[in-house]
Image (spheres, helix red, strand yellow):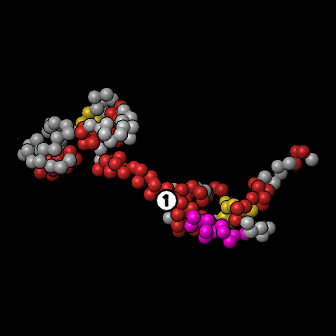
Amino acid sequence: MAKYYLGSTRCPTCDKKIKTEQGVRMHHTRTHDTRLDNRICDDCGKTFYDEKSQLNLCNSCVDGFRYSKTPEELTDEDWRTMSSYERWYYKNSDKEIKRVQKNRRKRRKYVVQKHLINAECERCGFNDPRAIEFHHTDRNKLDESLLEMSRNMRPKELIEKEITRGELLCANCHLINHHPNRFEKFK
């Protein structure tokens, strides 16, 4: 295996300038038929393919720096080691958080408007949407609750499928269903 300076963006054999460290590795393997040495962490001794892998996979290398500094506090080295998405997110995190929250509200609104506004209890017929709850008939097949599914932005088709696997009950019928013998010991 050939040796080269870690973090270099030039091929150690032909001195060709390449954009990323991973690109240098791929170029060297394909063009010169030899692999470059993996980088070795000074703290833990593990080997990593490139700097990005090391920062993502080695706890002692990251040292909690990500997202703990303001953009002004980051050094050029910090920015260089971040992926393009991390740099973008670092600069646009407020916008991204608002976008995700807006999409979650829209998904929740979809579930409520489509299934709860005009729903009634399937056992007693009560039809106030404030008291309608979703009851999972087979809890063994439950992956996520409807709230978690809408919060985690699951596809609408998956939410629809989950709704068909359960029933809509009012809060009273739902409680009675889950605790049929709740006060038997007091009789």
How far across and down, in percent of the image, does residue 161 sit?
58, 67
Amino acid type at circle 1 is: Lys
Q: Nearer the viewer, residue 40 or 103?
A: 103
Residue, disc 1 = 102
Q: Is residue 181 above or below residue 137?
A: above
Element assignment for label 1: helix
What residue appears at the point 35 percent right and 40 percent down from the top-left corner? Answer: 70
Q: Is residue 29 visible?
A: no
Q: Which residues are magenta?
A: 109-121
Q: Is 147 contained in the magenta span?
A: no
Q: Main secondary structure of the magenta part?
A: helix
Extreme left residue here? 14
How far across and down, in percent of the image, does residue 47 sit?
28, 36
What residue appears at the point 51 percent right and 59 percent down from the top-left corner? Answer: 104
How far across and down, in percent of the image, does residue 167 sit?
69, 65
What residue appears at the point 66 percent right and 56 percent down from the top-left corner? Answer: 139
Q: Is residue 23 visible?
A: yes
80 relative position to 101: left or right:
left
Q: Nearer the viewer, residue 172 or 105?
A: 105
What residue appears at the point 66 percent right and 64 percent down from the top-left corner? Answer: 166
Q: Nearer the viewer, residue 73 or 117?
A: 73
Q: Is residue 82 above or below residue 134?
A: above
Q: Is 120 contained in the magenta span?
A: yes
Image quarter where the N terminus lies is: top left
146 relative position to 118: left or right:
left
Q: Is residue 147 above or below residue 86?
A: below
Residue 141: name its quadrant: bottom right
At label 1, counting other C-alpha atoms closer than 10 Å, the crowd grade (few under 14, some 14-19, many 20 or more) is few
Extreme front residue here? 72
Extreme top residue here? 43
Residue 143: name its quadrant: bottom right
How far across and down, in percent of the image, does residue 5 sit?
16, 36
